[in-house]
């Protein structure tokens, strides 16, 4: 059975370009309820820990640098079939391949600056959400 929660974060360039409100409006219009949200900034070390699964890939260093370049907005979202529905809402990683009306089609600049992260599985949603929202931040 699919989880009713997923994790997302608005990435630094989308925050810098003042797209937080527009992206949140799209999320809520798609029927998601925001159960936890904050604005924070990753250090390079924390970005490295979050993206550790990609450590052996060529883009890892650039990814960590970009993700620690400015504030981000991590969120826990709730909706039936949350992970799958959210992946549909954000669209393909490459905005050129994203469906019209998706968050990445509207707000992404490139594959590397794709505006938003979305968990790819229920398991990763739980892990990623726990990374940003600890036991003192009940949701």
Image (tube, helix red, strand yellow):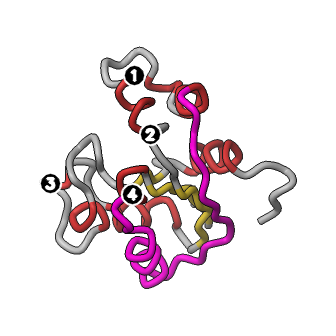
Q: Foreground: 102 or 46?
A: 46
**Mark 1 sits on what residue?**
61
Q: Which one is in front in this view, the residue at disc 1 or the one at disc 2?
A: 2
Q: Is residue 61 above or below residue 66?
A: above
Residue 29 in the image, given as x and y percentages of width and height: 43, 84
Which residue is more in the foreground, 88 or 46?
46
The residue shown at (54%, 58%) is 73
As measured in the structure, the alpha-carbon distance from the residue carrying label 3 to the one carrying label 2 is 26 Å
- The mark that comes first in sequence, 2 or 4, is 4
Q: Name the residue under label 3.
A: 97
Q: Write down the residue under mark 4.
A: 16
| Relative to 24, 112 lies left or right | left
Q: Which of marks 3 and 4 is nearer the N terminus?
A: 4
Report crowding for label 3: few under 14, some 14 to 19, many 20 or more residues within 10 A (C-alpha). few
Membership of 81 in magenta stretch: no
**Label 2 crowding class (10 Å Cα cut-off): few <14, some 14-19, many 20+?**
some
The local secondary structure at tag 1 comes to: helix
């Amino acid at each position: 059975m699919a989880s009713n929660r997923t994790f997302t974060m608005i990435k630094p360039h989308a925050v810098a370009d003042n797209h937080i409100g527009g992206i949140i409006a799209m999320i809520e219009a798609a029927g998601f309820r925001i159960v936890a949200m904050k604005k924070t900034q990753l250090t390079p070390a924390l970005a490295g820990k979050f993206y550790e699964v990609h450590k052996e890939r060529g883009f890892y260093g650039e990814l960590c640098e970009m993700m620690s370049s400015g504030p981000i907005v991590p969120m826990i979202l709730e909706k039936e079939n949350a992970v799958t529905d959210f992946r549909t809402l954000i669209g393909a990683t490459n905005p050129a391949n994203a469906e019209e009306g998706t968050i990445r089609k509207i707000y992404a600049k490139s594959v590397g600056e794709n505006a938003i992260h979305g968990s790819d599985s229920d398991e990763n949603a739980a892990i990623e959400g726990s990374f940003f929202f600890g036991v003192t931040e009940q949701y």
